[in-house]
Image (cartoon, rainbow, N blue to C red):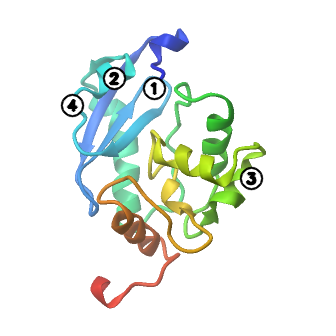
Amino acid sequence: MMTITETGAAGTVALAEVPTPVGAFTLAVTETGLVASGWGSGAGLAERLGLVEVHDADRTASAVAELDAYFAGELRAFRTPIDWRLMAGSRLRVLQALHAVPYGSAVTYGELAKLSGTSVPARGIGSIMGSNPIPIFVPCHRVIAGTGLGGFSGGVGVETKRWLLTHEGYLQPTLLDL
């Protein structure tokens, strides 16, 4: 993974750990915006990003509030600025195209390849989804296989993806969800 300092842009990052219905979720926010998110603890994340960690609840407050509103069913479009500096080239174009896929919908890996305007094949799109540094806000759970849900590396895997797509109304709830 390229760090921000390798790209020549040093800075700081504030972390927030948020309990969610799909597990503890960490948000990492730079001066520019959300640079990383994911399941579990943020321990060591600042160092992996090559940034100095600061304790700044004000910086993370908006992203935390939006994540809470999303899980409460009150938010359908995130407005949190994204810090795209860790991404470049085709990966950046794919993730930016994914960022525009609306709540309650899904695209196939092949459709996302076309939306991104890249020559990345569907299998390559799957690899980019698996390494998405900003899940939920850049909604890799909305990318599905042509034959079903496909894979998911966040949370507890495909069950987390199914939960998120059901929460957004793309999938119908099962008896287990009632």
What residue is pinned by disc 2? 48
Mark 2 touching mark 1, by CB under 8 A? yes
**Marked residue nearer the N-terminal end (3 or 1):** 1
Q: Which quadrant is home to the N terminus?
A: top left
Circle number at residue 115: 3
Q: Say left or right for 46 vs 8.
A: left
What residue is pinned by disc 4? 43
For disc 2, the neighbor class at 10 Å (few under 14, some 14 to 19, many from 20) is: few
**Marked residue nearer the N-terminal end (2 or 3):** 2
Mark 3 touching mark 1, by CB under 8 A? no
Q: Nearer the viewer, mark 2 or mark 1?
A: 1
Q: Which residue is more in the foreground, 106 or 19?
A: 106
Q: Residue at x 67, y 30 (%)?
A: 89
Report x, y in % for residue 137. Answer: 48, 49
Q: Say left or right for 6 vs 28.
A: right
Decide if residue 99 is in sight here.
no
Picture quadrant where residue 174 is located:
bottom left
Q: Amino acid at mark 1?
A: Met
Report x, y in % for residue 135. Answer: 44, 48
Circle number at residue 1: 1
